[in-house]
Each structure stands twice: as structure tokens, then as C-alpha cells.
Amino acid sequence: MVMQRLTGALGGILGGGGQKQTRKPGYPSLITIASGDAAFNTAAEVIALLPAAGAKARIWEMTIPGGGWLYRWGAGSPVTPDNQGYWWFALLDAGTGFASGIVTLAYESYDRHTYIPIVETHDALLHSVTNTSLATAALIDKKQMQALPEGGPLGNPAFVQQYSRLVIDYKCIARATAEDVADFNIPVTIYS
């Protein structure tokens, strides 16, 4: 009972949660660096925001536009694994090595007072072992990629609504010599 109230309260802040939604089914889409807000939508901006080893920082965010749109990290369901979302993420110094850290996908309310982590994953699981370029670092085989069902592995019921944000925080374990390549491809589900 307490957990249902808490989930409903958090979901309500971000739009969704314990409240019944009478919406059309969502449709899957993908987010890349270019989808981010103005200070977060290029590889150079993301790389400039990388923290020192041992520190954690916000490296990317996207504000949900007005107009009734609702977003969730991930797509599909583990019940139908071929139809769920899969993702990759890479930060590297091309030809030298990868940065190493923990990637956190989360939701943040418009006033930045509510923060809901959806999934945390070591980025070594999210890219290939070949650091020659972004093309060689990006995963394209679903069998090598990490699954990201709608709402994350635990199926968080919260939505992110207008003016709230999808965010990516990064806890750096070790930096590459001088990162010069960054990108990701992360599934989302969008409701209108």
C-alpha cells in the first residue's frame, strides 16, 4: 500500500504512475546525442561535461516539448524480446581507448526536485571492444546489445511529461587519454 502511494506520487509528478492513462499506445523511437537540449546536443558538448575519474556528472538531457507528449526510457517488453528496445553508448579516444564508467538513465522533473533513476549500466557492456572510430565502437547486432524495455528493467510506470527531462548521468571510473568521439542510440517510447 505504501509503495503504491509512493509510486503514484512520483509518477504523478512526472506524469503517469499510479494514475490510469487513457491514451493511445505509445510508439517506439530512438534518442541520440543530437536529440538533446542546446547545451547537450553535440559530441563536443557531451565530452566537455565528462567528469574526472571518481566523479559523477550530468552529460546529457532533453526537455520534453509542450503539447501533451509523454516519454519513457526504453521500448517494448521482455515478454517479446525481439520487439523490445536495445541500446548502445560509447565515449572514446579514437584509436586509443574507451572511457570507463557507469551510465545512469533517469527522469527529472521540470523544477529539478524529483529524480528517478531508471537503469544504471557499466558502459563496457554498451559498446564493442574496437576503438578505431564510432562506426567500429557502435553495436549493431541485437545479440550483443543490452535490452532496454519500456520503463527500464523494472518497468517503472512513470512518464516524463512536458518541460520535465530525460537525463543521462555518468560516473567516471577512468578517462580515455583525450575523448574525441561520443554518441549513443537509446530507445524511448513516446505517447501523444
Image (spheres, helix red, strand yellow):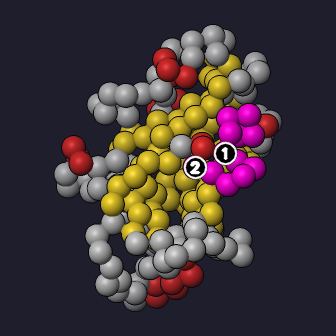
Q: Secondary structure beneath disc 2?
A: helix
The magenta stretch is 35-46
Label number found at residue 41: 1
The amino acid type of the residue labelled 2 equals Ser
Label number found at residue 173: none
The residue where tag 2 is placed is 35
Q: Residues within 10 Å of mark 2 (few under 14, many from 20)?
A: some
Residue 49 visible in image: yes
Q: Is residue 108 above or below residue 80?
A: below
The front one of 94 and 64 is 64
Q: Secondary structure beneath disc 1?
A: loop
> Are discs 1 and 2 less than 8 Å apart at CB?
yes
At a point 34% along the width and 47% down the height, the residue shown is 85
N-terminal-most mark, 1 or 2? 2
At a point 68% along the width and 19% down the height, the residue shown is 93
Q: Residue 98: where, in percent of width, then height? A: 62, 22
As for residue 62 lying within the magenta part, the answer is: no
Quadrant of the drawing holding the N terminus = bottom left
